[in-house]
């Protein structure tokens, strides 16, 4: 008997490896929770700005947009470095991965330095962070995000040694994947926060 005309080619019979989310599932639950929390804060900021346009316009005019733009570049660059580090680990290039991860840590640290300088400048200028609703929400949003950046930098610092020692490979880099997922969330939040708080009028 002749073979059926609809027979599947042998190359398509091979089972494809199941797709999975990178990192631990717990990290993704945490990311979802944090995104929801920040989403509520973003809505609170936008809604309060509608109620107090003059207060928010004055407050936003006092912010340094150039510093915010530099911080945006720092976080995006750190995300790119983290992605390169993960790709290097998967290719078993551990020395290269260590350099990329160290660069991500430095860039994240640069964000923290600039943001701290911004807070100190406000404090020295006599700005009371609880003086009006704009500064209350600005402090809540940027301060909460600041703590997430700090956490991301700590994670990168903890991952540096095992990456340098070659403990991770393409088949076992779950911890590094989880760290990168967390950092990309931090980056995404700032990409929304910066235009909402610093640019939009």
Image: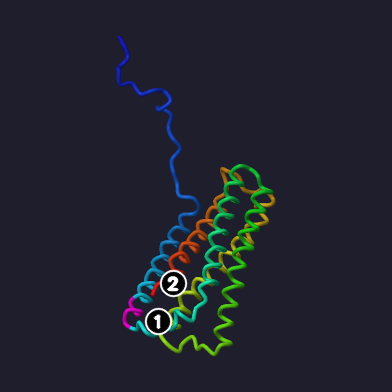
Q: Which mark is residue 99?
A: none
Q: Which mark is residue 56?
A: 1
Residue marked by disc 2: 199
Residue placed at 50% from the left, 56% from the top?
181
Q: Is residue 17 above or below residue 159?
A: above
The image position of residue 131, as x and y in percent, is 45, 89
Q: CA distance from mark 2 to mark 1?
A: 11 Å
What colour scheme was applied to this rendering of the protein?
rainbow
Q: Secondary structure at mark 1?
A: helix
Q: Is residue 60 above or below residue 1?
A: below
Tell me which corner region of the image, top left, top right, bottom left or bottom right, holds residue 152: bottom right
Of residues 122 and 42, the one drawn nearer to the viewer in this rendering: 122
Q: Secondary structure at mark 2?
A: helix
Tell me: 8 left or right of 122: left
The image position of residue 3, as x and y in percent, is 32, 14
Residue found farthest to the top: 1
- Please report whichever mark, 2 or 1, sits nearer to the chain's N-terminal start: 1
Bounds of the magenta segment: 47-51
Tell me which corner region of the image, top left, top right, bottom left or bottom right, holds residue 192: bottom left
Q: Is residue 130 above or below residue 66?
A: below
The image position of residue 86, as x and y in percent, is 58, 50
Of residues 186 and 157, the one drawn nearer to the viewer in this rendering: 186
Is residue 96 a member of the stretch shown in magenta?
no
The image position of residue 81, as x and y in percent, is 59, 55
Residue placed at 50% from the left, 73% from the top?
65
Which quadrant of the rendered structure holds the C terminus?
Answer: bottom left
Q: Residues within 10 Å of mark 1 (few under 14, many from 20)?
A: many
Number of numbered discs on residues: 2
Which quadrant of the rendered structure holds the N terminus?
Answer: top left
């Amino acid at each position: 008997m002749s073979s059926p005309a609809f027979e599947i080619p042998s190359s398509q019979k091979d089972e494809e490896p199941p797709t999975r989310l990178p990192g631990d599932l717990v990290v993704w639950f945490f990311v979802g929770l944090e995104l929801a929390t920040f989403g509520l804060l973003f809505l609170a900021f936008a809604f309060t700005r509608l109620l107090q346009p003059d207060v928010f316009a004055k407050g936003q005019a006092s912010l340094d947009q150039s510093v915010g733009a530099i911080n945006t570049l720092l976080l995006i660059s750190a995300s790119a470095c983290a992605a390169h580090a993960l790709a290097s680990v998967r290719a078993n290039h551990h020395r290269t991965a260590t350099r990329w991860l160290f660069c991500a840590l430095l860039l994240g640290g640069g964000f923290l330095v600039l943001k701290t300088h911004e807070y100190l400048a406000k404090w020295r200028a006599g700005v009371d962070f609880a003086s009006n609703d704009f500064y209350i929400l600005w402090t809540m949003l940027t301060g909460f995000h600041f703590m997430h950046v700090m956490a991301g930098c700590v994670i990168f610092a903890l991952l540096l040694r095992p990456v340098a020692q070659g403990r991770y490979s393409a088949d076992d880099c779950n911890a590094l994947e989880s760290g990168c997922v967390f950092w990309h969330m931090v980056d995404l939040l700032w990409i929304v926060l910066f235009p909402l708080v610093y640019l939009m009028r």
